[in-house]
Image: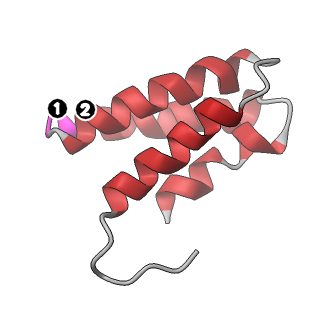
Amino acid sequence: MVFDDTVDMGEQARFAMEFCTVESCGKCTPCRIGSVRGVEVIDRIRAGENREANLVLLEELCETMVDGSLCAMGGMTRSRYRA
């Protein structure tokens, strides 16, 4: 996707993680639960709550999803928010 400089990239990161929540098949725990927790962490980051710790938590969560998911849905999570 291509965005101009008026787009709220924090909202786009949340949208991408929420998309995983909705589209997850639910077969594997990292994707099923990780995407829900990812939305919660992104919301805390956007609210300015303990930003640095939550950024680390989000990175670790996405790493778990990449390494532990059974399909590309969870495996692509990190690339959706890191850009």
Secondary structure type for disc 2 = helix
Query: Where residue 81 sits in the image (x, y, percent)?
Result: 49, 54
The residue shown at (47%, 40%) is: 59
Secondary structure type for disc 1 = loop
State the mark number for residue 50: 1
Please say if the residues under marks 2 and 1 sit with CB atoms less than 8 Å apart. Answer: yes
Kind of residue at disc 2 = Arg
Kind of residue at disc 1 = Asn
Q: Judge whether 5 appears above or below 29 on screen.
A: below
Q: How far is the residue under mark 2 from the one under mark 1?
A: 8 Å
The residue shown at (60%, 57%) is: 79
Segment tinted magenta in the rendering:
48-52
- As drawn, the residue found furthest toward the bottom would be 4
Between marks 2 and 1 in the image, the one whose residue lies nearer the viewer: 2
Q: Judge whether 23 appears above or below 7 on screen.
A: above
The residue labelled by disc 2 is 44
Q: Quadrant of the N terminus?
A: bottom right
Precedes in sequence: disc 2 or disc 1: 2
Asked if the magenta segment contains residue 36, the reply would be: no
